[in-house]
Image: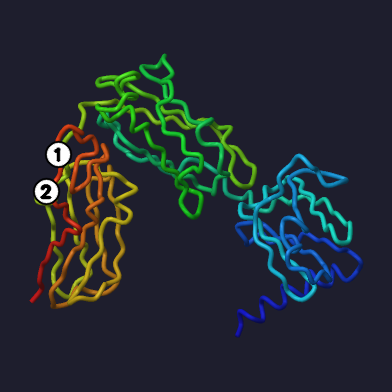
């Protein structure tokens, strides 16, 4: 009931503005990840016009609708004679936009105010956090303090070898960058075609990283967040490339420290090697007597172990630790297979495990 009241009050506010004669209004909402919405007043009954075709919104300032520019993508929600536009990607604070209502031939240019600048943006974490990585490193992760604007990654990342040579085309450049839901964590892949030994890019260009070489991965300060702010300075991650990792991780080599009954002690799993941060995030879950239990998973320093902290004390019963078989090491080798598999070797007849379960009991 409270939620419905909040929504109706929000709609009354833009309606009061539009009833004064304005047919288009931008409503600022600093609590929203989009920073606001565009509200159109229309008596149009044709639903086919209540979209980007009839109520387009453009980045920039225009007196008439531009014929050579694409409108913003987003959703249109009708409420009485109001249509509310929410963009797919956040409005950029401090920038201007123009909205058009084709039915009424009205348009309005508005500037999105800058409302969220209290927290300076910076690179919060870089994974892998170790300063030594295998030369066949497959992925790395950059975590920012603030949500970042998509579409800028590859132009703002430079890889330097031995303090002098820029590495040419080391990354697989996805058209849709690999951000998490909050747009704070980005996954960057080294080009797998240059890592897999049987593929022509590897044979022509070689592996992106060379054993015994030193590298500087530079994240340029020109990279902007969704508020339009740049980073305060360049971020530099220094690391060296060591021998190729061509062994699968093996859960039988892990060390598990089990908690005691009626405590909230941490269950610790030590891998004895640095694991891939992204797959660690969804690598484990625990059940007790067939029921999933609520736990907090803490990835420790250098990503060499994980700590599992229960919400409630451990009780007597049978427990199972479920491990995702897609959990990877830094070279992309998972618990079932190597990433760089020799294509000449037949894998027919080999059945891969669908899940890995480690059980333990408390009396």
- Tell whether 292 sits left or right of 181: left
**CA distance for labels 1 and 2:** 9 Å
Image quarter where the C terminus lies is bottom left
Give the quadrant of residue 161: top left
Whole-percent x and y of residue 225? 58, 43
At 14% from the left edge and 39% from the top edge, which residue is drawn?
346
- Tell whether 280 sits left or right of 150: left
Disc number for residue 27: none
Note whether 81 is above or below 108 in the view shown.
below
Count residues near mark 1 (Cα–Cα under 10 Å), then give few for <14, some for 14-19, many for 20+: few
Give the quadrant of residue 304: top left
Image quarter where the N terminus lies is bottom right
Closest to the observer, 237 or 181: 181
Give the quadrant of residue 290: bottom left
Circle 1: element type: loop
**Residue at label 1?**
346
Whole-percent x and y of residue 38? 74, 60
At 30% from the left edge and 59% from the top edge, which residue is drawn?
297
**Residue at label 2?**
349
Closest to the observer, 260 or 178: 178
Circle 2: element type: loop
- Tell whether 93 sits left or right of 217: right
Going by the picture, which residue comes out furthest to the top?
164
- Mark 1 and mark 2 residues within 8 Å of each other at the beta carbon: yes
């Amino acid at each position: 009931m409270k939620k419905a009241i909040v929504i109706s009050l929000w709609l009354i506010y833009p309606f009061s503005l539009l009833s004064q004669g304005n047919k288009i209004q931008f409503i600022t909402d600093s609590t929203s990840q989009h920073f606001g919405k565009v509200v159109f007043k229309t008596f149009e009954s044709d639903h086919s016009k209540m979209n980007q075709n009839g109520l387009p919104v453009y980045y920039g300032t225009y007196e008439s609708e531009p014929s050579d520019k694409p409108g913003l993508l987003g959703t249109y929600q009708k409420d009485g004679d109001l249509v509310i536009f929410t963009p797919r990607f956040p409005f950029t604070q401090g920038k201007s936009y123009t909205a058009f209502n084709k039915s009424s031939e009205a348009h309005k240019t508005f500037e999105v105010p800058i409302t969220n600048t209290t927290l300076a943006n910076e690179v919060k974490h870089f994974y892998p956090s170790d300063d030594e990585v295998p030369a066949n490193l497959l992925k790395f992760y950059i975590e920012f303090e603030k949500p970042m604007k998509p579409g800028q990654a590859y132009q703002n990342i430079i890889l330097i070898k031995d303090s002098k040579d820029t590495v040419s085309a080391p990354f697989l450049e996805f058209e849709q960058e690999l951000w998490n839901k909050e747009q704070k964590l980005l996954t960057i892949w080294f080009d797998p075609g240059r890592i897999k030994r049987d593929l022509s890019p590897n044979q022509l260009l070689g592996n992106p990283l060379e054993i015994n070489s030193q590298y500087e991965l530079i994240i340029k300060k020109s990279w902007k967040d969704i508020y339009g702010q740049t980073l305060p300075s360049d971020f530099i991650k220094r690391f060296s490339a060591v021998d190729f990792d061509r062994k699968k991780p093996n859960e039988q080599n892990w060390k598990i420290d089990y908690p005691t009954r009626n405590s909230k002690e941490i269950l610790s799993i030590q891998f004895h090697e640095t694991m891939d941060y992204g797959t660690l995030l969804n690598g484990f879950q625990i059940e007790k007597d067939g029921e999933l239990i609520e736990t907090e998973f803490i990835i420790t320093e250098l990503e060499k172990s994980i700590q599992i902290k229960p919400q409630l004390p451990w009780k007597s019963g049978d427990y199972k630790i479920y491990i995702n078989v897609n959990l990877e090491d830094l070279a992309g080798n998972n618990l079932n297979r190597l990433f760089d598999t020799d294509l000449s070797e037949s894998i027919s007849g080999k059945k891969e495990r669908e899940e890995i379960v480690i059980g333990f009991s408390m009396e």
